[in-house]
Image (cartoon, rainbow, N blue to C red):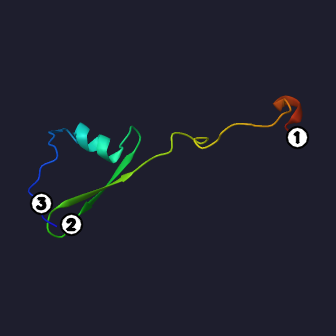
């Protein structure tokens, strides 16, 4: 896979490099996402984006029941 197209550039500062805005937006990269780096045999680099959930209850929609609950008295009930 060979391409002369340049989608963005950034400079390295210490051990860090910025991801160009266009690439972040197109790939949906957010804070806390991880990048997994792969060095290919031909010297090119492949980067895989590992998107993180925003929290333990990221997919929790909440309690939809009709009854009120009281966690202090109902916990062990």
**Quick one: 67 or 73, which is closer to the camera?**
67
Q: Residue at x 41, y 40 (%)?
A: 32
Quarter of the rendering containing residue 47: bottom left
Label 1 belongs to which residue? 76
Q: Of tags 3 and 1, which is closer to the observer?
A: 3
Residue 72 position within the rendered picture, expressed as x and y whole percent measured from the top left: 84, 29
Local secondary structure at mark 2:
loop
Q: Say whether residue 34 is left or right of residue 2.
A: right
Disc number placed over residue 3 in the picture, else none: 3
- Does dot 1 land on a helix, a strand or a loop? loop
Residue under circle 2? 40
- Quarter assignment of residue 43: bottom left
* Disc 3/disc 1 C-alpha distance (Å): 62 Å
- Report if the CB atoms under discs 3 and 1 are less than 8 Å apart: no
Could you give the CA–CA distance between mark 3 and mark 2, rounded to whole angstroms? 15 Å
Task: Tell me if label 1 and label 2 are in contact, CB under 8 Å.
Answer: no
Is residue 18 at least partly visible in the picture? Answer: no
Of 41 and 49, nearer the camera is 49
Quarter residue 40 falls in: bottom left
The percent position of residue 31, horizontal first and vertical second, equals 39, 37
Task: Please state, as top left, top right, bottom left or bottom right, where the C terminus lies in the image.
Answer: top right
Work out how far the residue at label 1 is from the one at label 2, CA to CA, in angstroms: 55 Å
Residue at point 19%, 38% (across, down): 14
Mark 3 or mark 2: whose residue is earlier in sequence: 3
The answer to which of marks 3 and 1 sits earlier in the sequence is 3
State which mark lies toward you, 3 or 2: 3
Report the number of discs.
3
**Left or right: 61, with 16 as reference point:** right
Q: Residue furthest left?
A: 4
Q: Picture coordinates of residue 56 (x, y %)?
A: 59, 42
Which numbered circle lies on residue 18?
A: none
């Amino acid at each position: 896979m060979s391409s002369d197209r340049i989608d963005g550039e950034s400079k390295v500062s210490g051990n860090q490099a910025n991801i160009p805005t266009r690439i972040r937006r197109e790939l949906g990269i957010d804070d806390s996402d991880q990048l997994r780096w792969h060095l290919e045999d031909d010297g090119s680099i492949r980067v895989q984006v590992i998107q993180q959930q925003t929290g333990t209850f990221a997919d929790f929609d909440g309690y939809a029941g009709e009854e009120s609950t009281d966690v202090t008295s109902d916990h062990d009930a």
